[in-house]
Image (tube, helix red, strand yellow):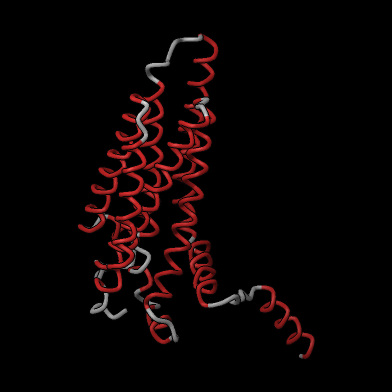
Amino acid sequence: YHIQKEGEKRLFKGITFHFNGGVTMALLKKEILISTRNMKGVLWFLFLISIWLAQIGTNVILSHNIQKYQPDITQKIAILQALQFIIAIYFICSFTLRFAFPSFSTEKKTAWILGGAPLNFRKIFIGKYVFYTSFFTAVGLIMSLINARVLHLDLIPAMHSVLLFVSTVIFVVTFGLILGLVFPSLDSDDPEVISTSMPGLFFTALSLLYGALSAWILYASLSTGMVVPLYGFIILTLLLVGVMLLSAPCLTKNRGW
């Protein structure tokens, strides 16, 4: 009996997940735990990553052919860079729509846990926001650096592209998370159903439109050499992010958070 109990203690001790390090860190670990234990979501993420890797392989073949046949693509490099930019934004929008946008609605069955904890809305939101923003920004940086490497971009154009891309990723993730918070699904907690709802379709259209606008700004900057509109757009994007973050508590004060 004692041997069995000792074995059970060791077993449960091995699978225990410790939420230490402060409130924000505990909420961050909680998001990581939920995301990694959702096998359907993990498989969906790996599926998108595989498509992205296939796209990178296409870029590698394109770069190899350019070096082999030595065509003059000086006038087309801006188009290629803008095209890679909007493709990467498409993947970020897909990730946000599948994971960040329905994150509050998928916790409908377990909302009483956070509701009964000594946490306010600000801490809960910050935990989710830090997790999704950090993760998708890291993914976006990897995308940008790989595309810059494949296209053999100079340092300055590559830096401009990375800065614009990171600001756009932060905007998309912020917009998706806040839109999902303001318009939670009352009928289902299935991310696939939530993603195809009216708010989900609105997010998809607006985020892709904003991504296309960012790609056009990048193309115009690379074509003309003028960086003032590009940095102006980056500042405008960060200001919009700040406005959304400041207005989030007011938009949700009557929704039970």
| Number of dots carrying numbers | 0
| Of the pair 38 and 30, the residue shown nearer to us | 30
Percent across and percent down for residue 89 are: 37, 42
Residue drawn at point x = 35 percent, y = 58 percent: 174
Residue 194: name its quadrant: bottom left
Q: Residue furthest left?
A: 198
Seen at 35% across and 69% down, the residue is: 104
For the C terminus, which image quadrant? bottom left
> In the current view of this chain or complex, which residue is farthest to the right?
3
Q: From the viewer's perspective, is residue 78 above or below residue 138?
A: above
* Residue 185 percent coordinates (x, y): 26, 67
Q: Position of residue 36 (x, y in %)?
A: 52, 61
User: Which residue is at the front of the view, 101 or 36?
Assistant: 101
User: Which residue shows up at 46% across the image and 69% down it?
Assistant: 127
**Residue drawn 43% across and 75% down?**
123
| Picture layout, residue 186 above or below residue 41 | below
Front-most of residues 181 and 216: 216
Q: Quadrant of the N terminus?
A: bottom right
- 127 relative position to 188: left or right: right
Q: Position of residue 196 (x, y in %)?
A: 26, 55
